[in-house]
Amino acid sequence: SQQGEEDPQALSIQEGENATMNCSYKTSINNLQWYRQNSGRGLVHLILIRSNEREKHSGRLRVTLDTSKKSSSLLITASRAADTASYFCATESLNEKLTFGTGTRLTIIP
Amino acid sequence: DVKVTQSSRYLVKRTGEKVFLECVQDMDHENMFWYRQDPGLGLRLIYFSYDVKMKEKGDIPEGYSVSREKKERFSLILESASTNQTSMYLCASTNGDGIYEQYFGPGTRLTVT
């Protein structure tokens, strides 16, 4: 069952601009995580935000969580060509299982 | 650094063959997972395991089985491969102490002809 849905499905921006992608989910969660996947590779964990947190930062990444709206956003500031990848949100509800969304494909144009 | 390895990056098998996908992690993680990834569908959980010899069905277990005889190794088995099992297969692991970040292997792209 699909829990998270990312929006937009694809995003192209100029290098140096900020990129924002959103995730909506359906049921109560313990935490929400964001992952990055470079083409044809495995996923890499970026950041985790717990259900009692509203905002979290890690380097150029900023994640917000609004549990009342069941939504999260990932902001990447000052984008670089190396940020080109697919980004997935994943929600953890119970038993340490993650449910992934369908992803946002981000392209940074040099 | 945690390392999760998968036995093959690319695999081509014929319909009806028995297929084994192997995953090994080197950080003594308790929990291991198998996903498949298809365009437009994201990652879907096939099976997971919390401990040696334990397994739990995920969202799409049909046509698959798993084996976990050792803590570091989690195998996915396609008993009789079919063309609709052509996909990217991803293995992941995580410890069991309440930190839920999953570490992924590089993936195996399986083609069933």
Image (cartoon, rainbow, N blue to C red):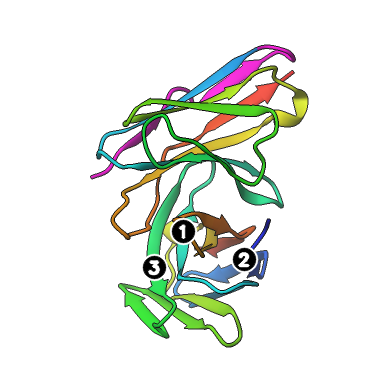
Q: Is residue B95 left or right of residue B36?
A: left
Q: Disc 2: which chain? A: A
Query: What quarter of the picture does the N terminus of chain A occupy?
Result: bottom right
Give percent across and percent down for residue A54.
42, 85
Element class at badge 2: loop
User: Mark 2 — residue?
Assistant: A4
Magenta segment boundaries in residue numbering: B1-17
Q: CA distance from mark 1 to mark 3?
A: 9 Å
Element class at badge 3: strand
Determine which quarter of the picture holds residue B50.
top left
Give the amino acid at mark 1. Tyr
Query: Reading the chain from its start, which is encountered first: label 2 or label 3?
Result: 2
- Depth check: B82 or A63 in front? B82
Residue A35, labelled with which disc? 1
Q: Is residue A11 left or right of residue B101?
A: right
Q: CA distance from mark 1 to mark 2?
A: 12 Å
User: Mark 3 — residue?
Assistant: A48
Give percent across and percent down for residue A89.
53, 64
